[in-house]
Image (spheres, helix red, strand yellow):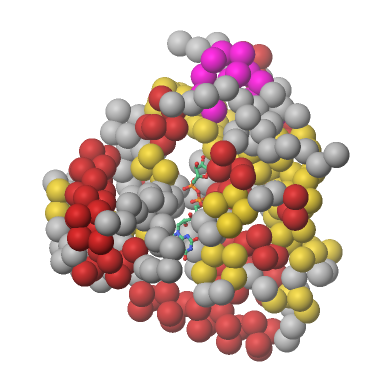
Amino acid sequence: MIDTSSLSGLRMRLRPEEPLAPRTTWRIGGPARLFAEVEDVPALGGLLRWAAAARLPAIPLGKGSNVLVPDEGLDAVVFVLAGELAAVSIEAPLVKAGGGASLMSLAVAARNTGLSGTEGLSGIPSSVGGAVRINAGAYGTEIFDLLEEVTLVSRVGEVRVVPAGTIPHGYRWSALCEGDDVVASATLRLRPAGRDEIDARLAEVREKRKRALPTGPNAGSVFKNPPGDHAGRVLEACGLKGLGVGGAEVSERHANVIVNRGSATADDVRELMARMREAVRARFGVDLVPEVEDLGRTVTNRPGPRSVESPR
Ligand SMILES: Cc1cc2nc3c(=O)[nH]c(=O)nc-3n(C[C@H](O)[C@H](O)[C@H](O)COP(=O)(O)OP(=O)(O)OC[C@H]3O[C@@H](n4cnc5c(N)ncnc54)[C@H](O)[C@@H]3O)c2cc1C
C-alpha cells in the first residue's frame, strides 16, 4: 500500500487500482496503481511533488483518445484534471480553458459568446491539455494557431505561464511532447463572429467527421502522415484494410485507424501496428511514425523530470 495521507486536504479524489479501459476511446488497458481527479493548481502541484518523492511516475490522462494502455495496467499515478482545471471562462476575445476541458465544451462556450475559431477542432474527442501537447488539428486549424499562452505545472509543482509563441511546435508535435510539464490551462484568442456563421461551420465539421470516421472503439489515426503523403493512403495501397490481430482490426473505412472489435488487447494493437509499419516499409521504404502513445513505454522508459524552457 502506498501512503497518501499527506495528500489529504488537497482538492482531489483518489482511487487505488482504477480500471483505465473505460477512460480510453480504445477501451483497452488494465488498472492504474493510483488514480486521481485533481481540481485545482495547488492540488496538481501537491500530487506531482508527492509522486516524485514516492518515485512513482505521474501520468496525465485527458480523454484517453490517443493512448494505448497496457493490459497489465500502469504502475503509476494516473490523473485527470477536473473542477477548476476543466472549466472554461471567457473574456472576449480571449477564452481560458482548463487542461481537462473537452474541445467540444470549449467550442460550445465560444459559440455561445459569438466567438469563432475552434469549430474545426470541435469534433476531436480531446481534452484541451492533450490537444495542446500534440498540437491537435483538423480541417485547417491547429490548436497552436489560436493559442495565446499556457499555464504549465512542472513535475516539482512549479507553475509557469508561458507565451505559446515561445513553445516550438509543428505537425502533431510540440516541445511539450519531449517534457513532463502538465498543461493546467490554455488561453486562446478567438474572433468575433455571428452565431449563424459559427453554427453553419460546426454543422459542416460534424457532417464531414461522421462520414470519415469508423464506428467502434478506436484512437483515431494511429500513425502520423509521412512528409508529403497520407498514412491512410499508403496503408490502403498495401491492402491492409480488414487485417486483424486478435480483437484488433484495421478499419474497413479508414486504413490508418485500428478498431477494437470487442476483445482487443494492447498486445494485439502493438502487433497489428508492427505489421502495418512493416508492410509500408517493404512497399514504399517509408517508416511510419506512431501518433498514438503507448503509455506502457512512457512508464518504463521514463527519464528524469524535464520541462519546457521558461522564456527569460
Ligand atoms: C475518433 C477520433 C478522432 C480523432 N481525430 C483527430 C483529429 O481530427 N485531429 C487530431 O489532431 N487528433 C485526432 N484524434 C486523436 C486525439 O483525439 C488527439 O491526439 C487528442 O489531442 C488527444 O487528447 P486526449 O485528451 O484524449 O489525450 P490522451 O489520449 O488522454 O493523452 C495523450 C497524451 O497527452 C498527455 N496529456 C493528456 N493531458 C495532458 C495535460 N493536461 N498536460 C500534459 N499532457 C497531457 C498524456 O499523458 C498522453 O501522453 C482523434 C482520436 C479519435 C479517437
Position of residue 101 measured from the top left corner of the image (x, y, whole percent): 62, 53
Q: Is residue 21 visible?
A: no
Q: Name the dominant secondary structure of the magenta segment.
A: helix
Looking at the image, is 247 positioned above or below residue 69?
Answer: below
Position of residue 278 measured from the top left corner of the image (x, y, whole percent): 21, 50
Q: Is residue 13 visible?
A: yes
- Relative to 115, 23 lies left or right: left
Q: As rendered, which of 265 and 1 lies closer to the eye?
A: 265
Q: Quadrant of the N terminus?
A: top left
- Relative to 288, 50 lies left or right: right
- Relative to 241, 214 lies left or right: right
Q: Which residues are magenta?
A: 44-58
Q: As rendered, which of 9 and 236 lies closer to the eye?
A: 236
Residue at 58% from the left image edge and 83% from the top image edge? 201
Place residue 282 in its image quadrant: bottom left
Residue at 54% from the left image edge and 28% from the top image edge? 58
Position of residue 228 measured from the top left corner of the image (x, y, whole percent): 43, 68
Looking at the image, is 200 positioned above or below residue 7?
Answer: below
Residue at 77% from the left image edge and 34% from the top image edge? 159
Q: Is residue 147 magenta?
A: no
Looking at the image, is 266 positioned above or below residue 141?
Answer: above
Q: Quadrant of the C terminus?
A: top right
Residue at 78% from the left image edge and 38% from the top image edge? 310
Place residue 184 in its image quadrant: top right
The mark tally for this picture is 0
